[in-house]
Image: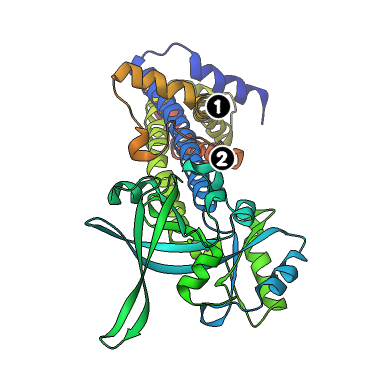
Amino acid sequence: MKPYELLIGLRYTHAKRRNNFISFISFVSMAGIVLGVAALIIVLSVMNGFQQELRTRILGVASHVEVTGAGDALADWRQVAQQVKADPEVVASAPFVMNQGMLALGGNVRGAVIRGILPEEEAQVTDLATHMRLGSLDDLKPGEWGIVHGLELAQALGAGVGDKLMVITPQGNITPAGVLPRMKQFTVTGIFSAGMYEYDSGLALIHLQDAQKLARLGEDVSGLRLRIKDIFRAPWVTRDLAERMPDHFVSDWTTSHANFFRAVAIEKRMMFLILLLIVAVAAFNIVSALVMAVTDKQSDIAILRTLGARPLSIMKIFIIQGAFIGVLGTLAGVSLGVLGALNLETVVPMLEKALGMDLFPADVYYISELPSKLEWADVEIIAGVSLLLSLLATLYPSWRASRLNPAESLRYE
């Protein structure tokens, strides 16, 4: 690129024009790029934050990897636990018994998943112990028939610590009158709030030995729940364990909650495409600004051509002019977006105070502040797409400028 091409192109971006409307269109184009890029970065950061928050809440209750046996019974679970702990990726394991039943208190009845656990080992694979509102997991003692359940379930049943619940399971007792469901009275020893409605409204915990008696499993369990070092390596850990233990079923969180996380990922992509339209509209405004600039500078183009400037040089001049708008708008948008994404905990309270309303009430969203996680890979992609759209927008007006006939342009000068 020759020095005069860069010099003239930059001069056209700030020189006084006879038509001030061109300057206005250029400013609008730049402002649109700034707002579009900033909005993209902030919104994607918020969605990353929500995704991380939801993943943390789900995996605080669900297992990273789960090993089960045929027929929902694992007879040799202690031996299997030793085998899985030999894997360097596995941090801890805990046995569990899974059952379903009805919880009844007075006239209130609710269905729930009843999970039998060993409290001391469960704390190593989940974060439920940190979510206890009342009581503790350690209050679950074998033979005392204690039960811990979610806050939503407690509110639906009207249950509190010390209340007696009736647990009804599908494993029936054979009587002369026919098969009757099994019923057992439990005492509420604790209430947790994991922040996920699925668990808070439909999960109850009892001691492993009580669950084995309730489900008539003897010494067997339903399976093992594993915690691994890196949750994103769960599919590889699952594959390795499945190859080493072909007689057992091994699954991980990426498959058990696949639809949920896939929906979040699709939503993120759609938000990216929708907000990218703001940048695209701003880039098309660059086309309008350059077309008018070419019309306004016809005599200048003609003079440059008569002085020996080649069509390619004329094209480069206007590409520089449009690219300058795109680069400046992208840089400003990236700066504004990164600052906004990193300071949402300050910006959101200011908005709530200005609007006089709570944007994210904790009783609805289970969060007291808007989560944000800035991914620099997202910033790079957004900046790259914005620059590419800005550059593409300069091609047609620049090509049109290079095709102007000097004689026709100077005829009426």
Point out residue 148 in the picture as x, y percentages from the top left corner: 45, 52
Q: Which residue is mark 2?
A: 384
Q: Amino acid at mark 2?
A: Gly
> Circle 1: is it few (<14), some (14-19), or many (20+) Cα within 10 Å?
some
Is 107 left, or right, of 399 in this rendering?
left
The residue that label 1 is drawn on is 331
- Note whether 284 is above or below 10 in the view shown: below
Tell which circle, 1 or 2, labels the residue nearer the N-terminal end.
1
Say which of 194 and 406 sits in front. Answer: 194
Q: Secondary structure at mark 2?
A: helix
The answer to whether 1 is drawn above or below residue 73 in the figure is above
9 relative position to 106: left or right: right
For disc 2, the neighbor class at 10 Å (few under 14, some 14 to 19, many from 20) is few
Q: Answer whether labels 1 and 2 touch (C-beta < 8 Å).
A: no
Q: Position of residue 221 (x, y in %)?
A: 57, 72
* Residue appearing at x 62%, y 65% in the figure: 235
